[in-house]
Amino acid sequence: MTPSVYWSASSIWHRTSACSSSSPTRGLRTTTTNAAGFYTNLQRAGDYAAKLGITVCFETHRGLCVNHREMLQVMADLAHPSLRLNFDTGNLLYYNEHVCGEVALTKACHLVKHVRLKDSSGRFADWKLPGTGERRRGQFSAGLPDHA
């Protein structure tokens, strides 16, 4: 099994000149100037990760991977076997209205290398302290294949 590291590319994105003056709420396709260079640098990070025998996993955050649609598009654009997803159940529900986490996981599971189970009320922009959430984690685990 390949070790994995999860990393929030959105935090790097916010520090680059490719980022517009306001925080991105969708993927890189909404900005123009340096998005291609940013993707090239991410692919280089994937190349380096491959040499080290690790996988870099993108966190579920605004910027690159806010929901399964963005996750799928970013992974298709990057097309790198050492760049995968950290699927964060709490962040998915926090950052997105009208999303079904189980459906999102099922659609993206072939690209998920790490899963972070986090408490959530299941409501948009509603954060919960650990142990106080209302969502059942078993609902998400049903969407994972045996090898994930």
Image (cartoon, grey):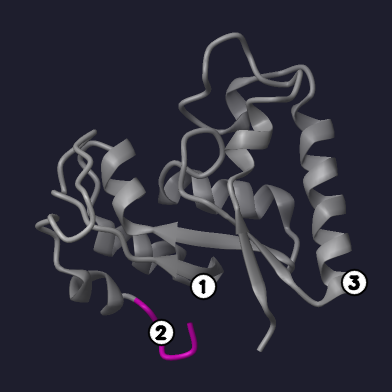
User: Could you tell me residue 88's position as x and y percent?
Assistant: 39, 57
Which residue is rendered at x = 23% and y = 36% of the image?
97
Magenta range? 144-148
User: Could you tell me residue 83's position as x and y percent?
Assistant: 69, 61
> What residue does disc 2 label?
145
The tag on residue 51 is: 3
The amino acid at mark 1 is His
Q: Are marks 3 and 2 in contact (CB under 8 Å)?
A: no
Label 2 CA crowd tier, 10 Å (few <14, some 14–19, many 20+) = few
> What residue does disc 1 label?
110
In the depicted structure, whether residue 65 falls above or below residue 2: above
Which residue is rendered at x = 41% and y = 90% of the image?
146
Which residue is rendered at x = 42% and y = 51% of the image?
68
Q: Are marks 3 and 1 in contact (CB under 8 Å)?
A: no
Q: CA distance from mark 3 to mark 1?
A: 22 Å
The amino acid at mark 3 is Lys
Q: CA distance from mark 1 to mark 2?
A: 8 Å
Q: Quadrant of residue 52?
A: bottom right
Q: Are marks 1 and 2 in contact (CB under 8 Å)?
A: yes
- Marks 3, 2: nearer the viewer: 3
Q: Earlier in the sequence, mark 3 or mark 2?
A: 3
User: Could you tell me residue 3's position as x and y percent?
Assistant: 67, 78
